[in-house]
Amino acid sequence: MHSGDKIAQLYKEAKKKGSKHCGIYSLMTPNYMVIDLEMVKNVMTKDFQYFVDRRMYVNEKDDPLKKDNGTMIFAESQLFIAVGVLITVIAVGYTYLKWNYQYWKRKGVPYLEPTIPFGNLENGFKRTMHMGDRIAQIYQEAKRNGWKHCGIYILLTPTYLVVDLDMVKNVLTKDFQYFTDRRFYSNEKDDPLSAHLFAVGGKKWMNLRRKLTPTFTTGKLKGMFHYLIDCGSLLEKYLEENVDDIGPVDIKDILGRFSTDVIGSCAFGLNCNSFKEPDSPFRVHGKRVTALTKFDMLKLLFCMSFPEFSRALGFCINSAPVRKFFYKLAQDMVEYRRKNNVFRNDFLQLLVNMKDDGTTLTMDEIAAQCFVFFIAGFETSSTTMTFALFELATHPDIQDKVREEIETVFARHDGKMTYDSLSELKYMMQVIDEVLRKYPPISTLMRECVKDYKVPGEDVVIEKGTGVVIPLKGILYDEEYYEEPEKFDPERFTEKKKRERNRYAHIPFGEGPRICIGERFGIMQSKVGLTSILRRFKVKLNERTELPLKMNINSLVTSTESPIWLDVERISE
Ligand code: HEM
């Protein structure tokens, strides 16, 4: 009831008892209540000198507007209630956070002390490093403490971090059935493109993976290989025609154009030629997919932390123009091939054929799987080639050795770039392996525990729903596996050295049933790009490149903040 009615109720009660006055409490404050009318007269009139004030809250200093008419702002009791509620909310919130941050302590898993509200991540407003580097830092600390695994907090979410390589193997491979999901955000209803192989989990992932695996076999890759060669020729031709005039090149931009042509051709059946048409809608929209802003990153982190809530609110990671463009493109290409009986030996065709032969993929599924080339394949491949050329420009002796190998191997294949000749480039593969170690495009692997998991050899059960982190970059920079990890040294990847090292110390494509499905494609694409440049041109580091390289802390995939500028020189015949 209104506080006036409550006072009236108290008045009636006192009157019933025959009291002329009585004492009451307003919250914690004692108040004197007058019942008898003679007494009322005394207080209000006769003895007014004792009761001149009204006891209302006025704040002249901070609210001068109220000063002129002397109006009250808050009645004291209301202020009390507001302050009380606020204090209670803060106290309950604080107690909850403290309790939440004791999750790993309660489970008896070693943990690093978190801070409210970022957990073990850096303060979100003052970040100095990429999240993958922060996770690598935590890995190093855990390793120094002699831990095989530990508990961390990603913002408020308790997350399990695996340190020991046998445990990594268990999570990724041996006990995969407990860790089938990746915990990447997708919202199939509002953004069908987001329901691609990388993002989906459970049965949906299993079905899709089964259907898509045959499209990534060596045989299918060989069938698509001539499209890769065509794209490599466009890259080579562009440099041939322009190398004398263009000056230093932003090498990521050049390789980005090459990768756009590859995806356009193999995933969507388009002849893009991004070297002639750098601003085609396909390239412009493709750039938008991978160039995330700070806000996009925060949104992604939020959506991954609270997926159900984010889906209920209809949050999408891809912007509306990107969603519309790629969906319509895939739809138009499928329609065109159907109507005109056009057949092309590419990824899109393999998906279309599935639709026709009863394995059935819906149009939404087809569009999403074409799109996954962008999400998982574009930036990863172009960043690998970029860092490879940066290191080769910095180490001319290694560059010469790669070129000599190309010449020797190609001499055995009539000077031709073929699937087989590229497969024989063993030293180039060592270079790529070392690039993927030093600059892993995806620096952290993620899994979600989908049913309670008893950690072998430990008295610990990881609960269903817990996020699991494999600190890939931490492992790839671990001195136990790689001496002088900052040094670029392809000799680490000779067959002998690889045999001597734990396999799980080098898994830049992940491992187990959820390993990168495009591994072979990514490697082939990188070899085509690198060979197209290196067999005709020498690359040297241009002084415009800012050294030491500063990494972009907001991108999903490892990349630099400013361009890598290279001088490209024709090799005299
Ligand atoms: C150098 C190039 C590439 C690198 C370093 C790379 C790396 C990775 C990594 C680390 C994962 C996560 C694996 C895990 O969680 O165990 C992954 C998954 C994936 N990658 Fe790649 N990738 C590359 C190229 C490509 C290409 C060209 C495609 C083309 C389609 C592709 C498609 C995928 C897909 C679909 C997944 C998710 C697989 C699944 O969850 O079943 N990747 N990749």
Image (spheres, helix red, strand yellow):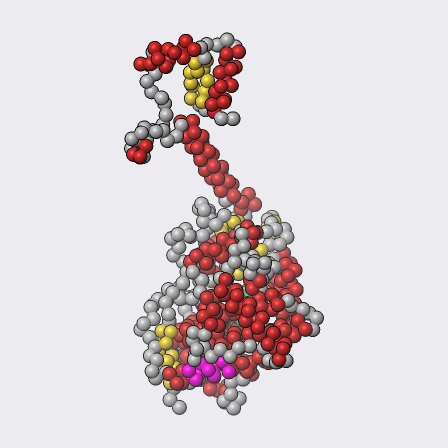
Along the viewing direction, whichever of 99 and 216 lies nearer the viewer:
216
Magenta: predominant secondary structure element?
A: helix
| 232 drawn magenta | yes
Along the viewing direction, whichever of 202 and 413 lies nearer the viewer:
202
Q: Give the range drawn in magenta.
A: 230-238
Residue 357, percent from left and from top: 69, 73
Residue 65 to residue 448: above or below = above
Looking at the rendering, which quadrant does residue 247 occupy? Answer: bottom left
Q: From the viewer's perspective, is 72 left or right of 280?
A: left
Residue 423 to residue 366: above or below = below
Q: Which residue is drawn at 59% across and 58% down?
A: 189
Q: Residue at x 53, y 61 (%)?
A: 445
Q: Would residue 459 be seen by someone viewing this image from the given angle?
A: yes
Along the viewing direction, whichever of 145 and 79 lies nearer the viewer:
79
Residue 476, percent from left and from top: 48, 64
> Which corner quadrant holds the C terminus?
bottom left
Q: Residue at x 41, y 69 (%)?
A: 487
Looking at the rendering, which quadrant does residue 250 occupy? Answer: bottom left
Residue 354, percent from left and from top: 66, 72
Number of numbered discs visible in the structure rendering: 0
Q: From the viewer's perspective, is 71 left or right of 421?
A: left
Q: From the viewer's perspective, is 258 left or right of 514?
A: left
Q: Hey, which residue is sitting farthest right in the picture?
A: 358
| 426 drawn magenta | no
Residue 94, percent from left and from top: 47, 39
Q: From the viewer's perspective, is 389 left or right of 493?
A: left
Q: Quadrant for ligand 1?
A: bottom right
Along the viewing direction, whichever of 185 and 514 lies nearer the viewer:
185
Q: Residue at x 68, y 73 (%)?
A: 356
Q: Would residue 511 be seen by someone viewing this image from the given angle?
A: no
